[in-house]
Amino acid sequence: MSRRALQFIVVLLGWSAVANLSAQSPAKPGVASPSPVASVTPQTAPTPTTTSLVDSMDSADLKEAIQLLKNNYIKPEALNETELNRATFEGILTRLGRGVVLLSDSAAEPTESAAPFFGEILEGHIGYLRLGALIRPNLDALDANLKTFAAKKVDALVIDLRASTATNDFATASEFAKYFCPKGKPLFSLRKTTVRQERTFTSDRDPSYQGLTIILADGDTAGAAEAIAGTIHLYDRALVIGQPTAGRAVEYSDLKLPSGKVLRVAVGEAVLPEDRPLFPGGLKPDVPVEMPAADKREIFQQSREKGMTPFLVENERPHLNEAALISGKNPELEAMEAAQRRGRGPEKTTVRDPVLQRALDLVTSIAIFEKR
């Protein structure tokens, strides 16, 4: 085969076809070459899970399966009526997830104290608002802080909902949302399907702030706080940074059982405009950032006295570098020895808030972009 013909085949078929062609022996005159047979790689179907198999069973299958177990299982006492009811109820709890919770009588009432409101101005122009519990005193604190921010020309806002745990008070939650959403717009609806009730909360006032907004959220952002986050995210096109919310934007009802245990059942769910659900998937962040829950709680506790700035930028400390290696010194070791000579050990590493830091970085990036 000539070089020109080979080059032509390379262009048409690619290198793999040429490799296969060169590996074949020339056919003898008068003998037909066997037709190539395409190799087929068998693909193994994935093994179905128990859940998928159970989901594929209809009512007849389920009824017959239970009867077959009763008639044939080696320990029939494990399938008496009480055990079957327990298994059924346990399966319901697993399948409904956040929609139903079984509590002992002592766990029915909340034990943690209401998270306080906190606000400050960061970097001279960014307002930081940690709403805390969605209660009236914190709503008044929000109003006062927004007025202060307006007087000080704050041009960006970070709303921190990571300390806003679940509450059934969607009416108060709507009052928080009104500070950031357009007047006359529906905020969210509380829908109770079983009793065919739906209550829509609508903003009846002008917003106190209109500008760049960033929401901080995580798995502790639950209940009505998720409705606030979803509403501001929808109308203000606010970015959400952190982790997915709890997926519990529901109204619970506590139902007592004869033993004193409590069955906490979701009887209503908060739905955003255009039927956008929050239960059970929660609100997903636009910018995912992870942070240990213990670090967050420690920062929130200390920030009441120190503010949030100490938990953002790492304080400069001596590092081992090339110049130190050449001179035979170790700045890190020397700093530790100096601290010991002063009668104290090396300074404890301060915890940081990477979620808030990412929000501030984003505000700075947007400001730089808009000035171009």
Image (cartoon, grey):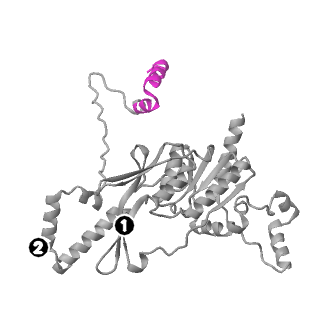
Q: Tell whether 213 sits left or right of 332.
A: left
Which three-letter amino acid code belongs to the residue tagged 2?
Asn
| Image position, residue 236 (x, y; %) | 56, 44
Q: Secondary structure at mark 1?
A: strand
Q: Which residue is mark 1?
A: 253
Quadrant location of the C terminus in the rendered image: top right
Q: Which residue is mark 2?
A: 71
Q: Residue at x 39, y 46 (%)?
A: 275
| Image position, residue 144 (x, y; %) | 66, 56
Q: Give the tally of numbered discs.
A: 2
The circle on residue 292 is none
Which three-letter amino acid code belongs to the residue tagged 1?
Ser
User: Toward the viewer: 273 or 237?
Assistant: 273
Closer to the chain start, of discs 2 and 1, is 2
| Farthest right residue in view | 327
User: Toward the viewer: 360 or 345?
Assistant: 360
Callout 2–callout 1 Cβ contact below 8 Å? no
Q: Residues within 10 Å of mark 2 (few under 14, many from 20)?
A: few
Q: Residue at x 38, y 78 (%)?
A: 104
Q: Residue at x 26, y 25 (%)?
A: 32
Residue 79 seen in this snapshot? no
Query: From the viewer's perspective, is residue 23 above or below residue 107?
Result: above
Main SS class of the magenta portion in the image: helix
Mark-to-mark CA distance, 2 and 1: 40 Å
Query: From the viewer's perspective, is residue 9 above or below residue 346?
Result: above
**Callout in the foreground (2, 1):** 1
Quadrant location of the N terminus in the rendered image: top left
Q: Secondary structure at mark 2?
A: helix
Residue 117 seen in this snapshot? yes
Query: From the viewer's perspective, is residue 4 above or below residue 138?
Result: above
For the record, the magenta segment spans 1-20
